[in-house]
Every structure is written in C-alpha cells, then in structure tokens.
Amino acid sequence: MSFKISQSALRDFYDDEVCQIKWEETYVNGYRSQPTAAMLDGLVFEQQVIGMSRGGEVYEIPKGKTGKPLKRETDLLKLAAQSKKTMQDLEIELIDVQPHWEVEDLSGHPDALVKYKGELAIMDLKYTGVREDESCKWNPYAWEDLEYKDFRQALHYVEMYYLMEGVYLPFFYLVFGKSGWCKFIFVDITSSALDDYRMLLNTFRSDLRDFYPKPINNYSTCRKCPIMCDKRLTKPNITNITI
C-alpha cells in the first residue's frame, strides 16, 4: 500500500471509533461522502472569509422553499463579513489560500499561508457551532480546556513546511463561533513535540505495511456509514449480562 500521509489519515487510523474498512475506502481508495449540514456551514464560511475551500470546490447552502436564503445562510454570511474584518484588525494578510503540499510521503492542505504582522505563518480557519466555553475534554470540536485538544494538525503542517523550505513557521488557529465569539490560538511547538510526531509517523508507516482492514462490528457506527460494505451490521449488537 502506497499513498501520501495526511494528518487526517494518521488521526483516523488510530481512532478506535473509525471503522478500518471506512478508513481504507476514504484514504486509500478515495471515497468522499457528502458533507453534513455542519460541515457545509464550515465550507461556505471558509469560502466567504478566505475566498476558497479545499480543491477550489464551491459549496452552497440550500435555499428555502421560495428560493430565498434561509436564516441559517444570512447569519453565516453576516458572521463571515465580521470575521474578515477581525482578520484585518489582527493584521493577517493572505498569501496562499488552500495550497496543496506534498513532500516525501506526506500530504497537506493547510487553509492558508499568511503574514501575521508582516511575518510568514500557517493559519487554520475554523467555524464551529459549539459554545465558547465547551470543553475539549468532552467534545473534540470544542475550543476550551486546550490541554485536551489534539494538535497533530499543527505538527503535520509545520513539519511539512520545514521539509519543503527548511524553516519552522509559526502556526495558529483562528476560530469563529456561530454565536459570534472568536479565539486566536497560537500553537507554540517544541522540538520534543515534533520529535514525538516524527516517531508517530514512523510507527504509522510500519503499522501500515501489515494493515488489513477489519470491520468495526458496531451497529451504531454501521447504521450511519454511507459505505455499503458486506461487513456492516444490520442489527443491533447483543449484550449478555449475568445477574
């Protein structure tokens, strides 16, 4: 098996809640599912704020029965306009939007290469419907209690840029909440964190050589999966207890 390692492929490979069959279909065979409503909102927000979504694809929020925009869309566009102003106030200048990076056996799609106060940096733009104070401990899409957050995305892009250009760039998240909140999160990456990530990449390369996808055997997961494989469970799992 040979393919470019993305940070999402690495993340999902070691996630016990991701079916290995779905992992192979997605990251090896190129299967792409339709975006959920939440994902679609994020893609449209991204288009409005930085001008493009990954791959240059254009996304639209469905209109109402009369053909007019729904409140969901007008609220999103209003927030996007405010967010663009916030970026200007923060002195963030877009340099390269949605670049596709490949180096060695790694692949990456950062949202933007930017200048922050005149200095080059990598920016990841986020839109979320969660509350500002919702904890990352319980919700991986939250942005509070950041000690529980998975920052391998930052490590992946910083490592890739170093391999391409020989420079360690700063990395930050610019997170906008549906209710209007905003967080500007600089990720201070240590050399030990990068060393640990490189070890993880090597472990992944080794594990991938012997990889044979196994079904997850979980009805709750299977019933929501768009991939109609012959291993999917069509009935709930039976739980036996002794009392």
Image (spheres, helix red, strand yellow):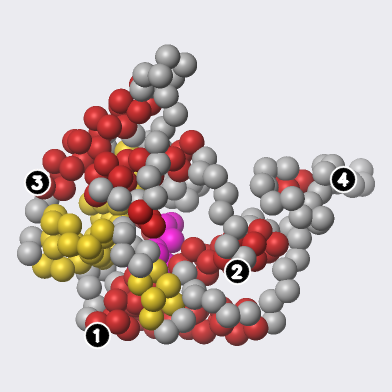
Distance between mark 3 and mark 1 Cα atoms: 30 Å
Q: Is residue 108 left or right of residue 164?
A: right
Q: Earlier in the sequence, mark 4 or mark 3?
A: 3
Distance between mark 4 and mark 2 Cα atoms: 32 Å
Observer-side mark, 4 or 3, equals 3
| Mark carried by residue 238 | 4
Query: For mark 1, does the 10 Å Cα neighbourhood hold few (<14), some (14 to 19), or many (20 or more) residues?
Result: few
**Location of residue 151 with respect to 128 vertically, above or below:** below
Q: Earlier in the sequence, mark 2 or mark 1?
A: 2
For badge 4, the amino acid type reads Ile
Magenta-colored stretch includes residue 150: yes
Rendering quarter of residue 106: bottom left
For badge 1, the amino acid type reads Gly
Observer-side mark, 3 or 2, equals 2
Task: Residue 175: give x, y in percent of width and height.
Answer: 29, 47
**Location of residue 34 with respect to 147 vertically, above or below:** above
Query: For mark 4, does the 10 Å Cα neighbourhood hold few (<14), some (14 to 19), or many (20 or more) residues?
Result: few
What residue do we see at 20% from left, 36% from top? 81
Q: Earlier in the sequence, mark 4 or mark 2?
A: 2
Task: Residue 83: give x, y in percent of width and height.
Answer: 21, 40
Kindly identify which residue carries mark 1.
166
Query: For mark 3, does the 10 Å Cα neighbourhood hold few (<14), some (14 to 19), or many (20 or more) residues?
Result: few
Kindly identify which residue carries mark 2.
28
